[in-house]
Amino acid sequence: MTSKHRKPYIAGNWKMNLGRAQALDLIKTIKGRLGDGSDREVAVFVPSVYLADVAAVAQGSPLGVGAQNIYYETEGAYTGETSCQMIREVGADRTLVGHSERRHLFGEPDEWMARKMRCALDHGVVPMLCVGETLDERKANRTERVLKRQLEAGLMLLKPDDYHLASIAYEPVWAIGTGEVATLEQIGAAHACIRKFLAAKIEAEIAQTVRVLYGGSVKPDNAAAIMALPDVDGLLVGGASLKPDTFIPIVEFDS
Ligand code: PEP
């Protein structure tokens, strides 16, 4: 199976942006301009407090709605955290795991990622594991080592049957929200490294089902070129997902 046989997956990460009215306007506009979802999967990862409202608007459409983060315990004294059951209960069906802002601003360790991935899958929440190197790590030629470490840790508790549900987002930390896009060569090399890791870890047939997305300053004018790379199956879009005028053209990239 080549990337051209995996359904393209375009996802927006709203981060901690948008007021409630703006969030609802945005989701209504995206829903209204979305096709039938047959040739590409589209989802938005929204602030937890808006999940119920946004999921209610998206209901009945092919638009996926997910959380930006989860905690791996099911309930208890974990002030400020959100469980997978809570996310499911309000109508969301997916979550990001290990976004670089969680790892680097909030100090979430690699070990948590395996538990979060397991917890999400056990509760019917489809996880997207985010991995990526910092600028210092890239400059020190440690990109592949970092990716392998993060993949090993994040996928540690997955069973063969889980892989077709999971996706991976390669997001170089230095390209997130900076306007600096990785070159096509850098993206190609990182995605090839991720595919090689998957091929070595699990049966080839299963490895081929996992979609690998790129994220980092994706805009309407670079989306098609990135999507044309052989190992890129989708895009995780931050800043440009906050406005229909920039998100919709990315969703509608010419394949
Ligand atoms: C992100 O938030 O995952 C992201 C890639 O952000 P941006 O597109 O703004 O770089």
Image (tube, helix red, strand yellow):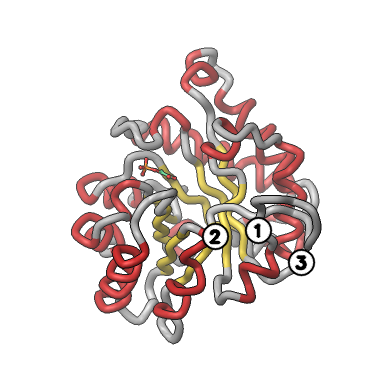
Residue in front for this viewpoint, 116 or 16: 16
Work out how far the residue at label 3 is from the one at label 1, CA to CA, in angstroms.
Answer: 15 Å
- Residue 117 image position (x, y, % from top left): 70, 54
Which of the numbered marks, if any, corresponds to residue 122? 3
Mark 2 residue element: strand
- Residue 248 image position (x, y, % from top left): 25, 63
Q: What residue sits 54% from the left and 60% below the top?
A: 67
In the drawing, does residue 170 fall left or right of residue 69?
A: left
Residue in front for this viewpoint, 71 or 189: 71
Would you call the spot at circle 2 few (<14 residues within 10 Å), some (14-19), or many (20 or more)? many
Q: Which residue is mark 1?
A: 82
Q: Which of the marked residues, 2 or 1, is nearer the chain's N terminus?
A: 2
Mark 1: amino acid? Thr
Tell me if the residue at label 2 has its CB under 8 Å from ligand 1: no
Q: What residue sits 53% from the left and 54% below the top?
A: 68
Mark 3 residue element: helix
In the drawing, does residue 207 fall left or right of residue 73?
A: left
Quarter of the image for the C terminus: give it: bottom left
Q: Which residue is mark 2?
A: 67
Would you call the spot at circle 3 few (<14 residues within 10 Å), some (14-19), or many (20 or more)? few
Q: What residue sits 42% from the left and 58% below the top?
A: 11
Work out how far the residue at label 3 is from the one at label 2, CA to CA, in angstroms.
Answer: 16 Å
Q: What residue sits 27% from the left and 52% below the top?
A: 224
Work out how far the residue at label 2 is from the one at label 1, CA to CA, in angstroms.
Answer: 9 Å
